[in-house]
Image: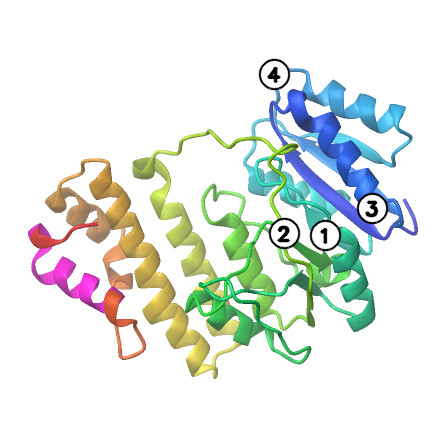
Amino acid sequence: MANVDLSIIIPSKNNKSKIAAIIKKLAAETENLDIEFIVIDMNSSDGGVLEALNVIKDSGIRGCVIQSGGSTVSSALNTGIYKASGKYITFVYPSRLYKDYFTDYFSAAEERKADFIFAAPETKDGNRILVSDNVSGTDVLVSLVKSSIVMDFTAVMFDREFLVRNGIRFYEECTLGYAEAFIYNVLLHSPKVAYSKTKLERDHLNGLEKNDAISASNNCFERLDAMVKVFSAAKELHKDDKVLLNTLEYNELPAVAMGCVDKLLDEGFKYSSIKKLLKSKKYDSYIEFSMDTPASLRNKIIIWKTLPWFYKP
């Protein structure tokens, strides 16, 4: 498929009731672009594959449906990247759908020759931030980790060649935190960053409700494993960037590790059991703090390490 502006990759499982409407909606929002749809079906049992094929065929839309079996979402997304032929790539999650933003993103990408495009970030109180075109990827990453800006990882766009050239992929074994880790890895590879002035608005009418419960005891450490890999990549790519490395080591890693502790306590695990689990997997080595650690997180770590029976999630 030559001369494609944008590849829209949609991971899908048992979305028969909505997949046709989602594809039609996205096609209408991108009618001024040359696009392709790549629907990655993850072993649907409700006829979603046929529904997606029919709407693509009947509407004369360029696209395909690929069956990836019972793999993870991250594996399905990697399949989509491999199959895509668009100049740019974006991912659409049926359970977190947004209203029209593709055209504005594409325009921002073309105007600034960007590798990574996202909506102008917000502060925690909802104020928009005007980002300089010269902002570095690591500066954005540090701001995200420190929560000085907020970005929705499910509404972003990438230059496909940039991803392929740098070998950036989703961690396929990861079912939690895979989008966050992917974005962080993109930012570590010094992309040309651009933002769109679009204000994202959720599309609850066409989107699906996410109702798949995840057991913390089985999955909560997958996000930590992903962040450890990101930290390793940061040390390799930016070994002299002390601000970046300290932010990851003494802010991101302990925050994610303590999040795991909170989830396990919420599920009824005993303090002693969690301590043994952390030690056996050497996860306790990531629960450290420095002067760069926010005071609230530092206090949590101190209580957990010295008086765990007083610690509350």
Mark 1 or 2: in front is: 1
**Crowd band around label 2 with a 10 angstrom C-alpha radius: few (<14), some (14–19), many (20+):** many
- Mark 1 or 2 closer to N-term? 1
Horizontal side of 150 relative to 76 (left or right) equals left
The answer to whether marks 1 and 2 mark residues whose Cβ atoms lie closer than 8 Å is yes
Amino acid residing under circle 1: Tyr
The residue indicated by pointer 2 is 155
Marks 1/2: CA–CA distance: 9 Å
Instruction: State which quarter of the image contains the N terminus.
Output: top right
Mark-to-mark CA distance, 3 and 2: 15 Å
For residue 176, what is the image quadrant?
A: top left
* Residue 30 badge: 3
* Magenta-tinted stretch: 297-309
Badge 2 amino acid: Ala
The image quadrant of residue 124 is bottom left
- Residue that appears at 16% across and 47% down: 276
**Apparent side of residue 280 relative to residue 225 in the rendered image (left or right):** left
Is residue 36 positioned above or below 305 on the image?
A: above
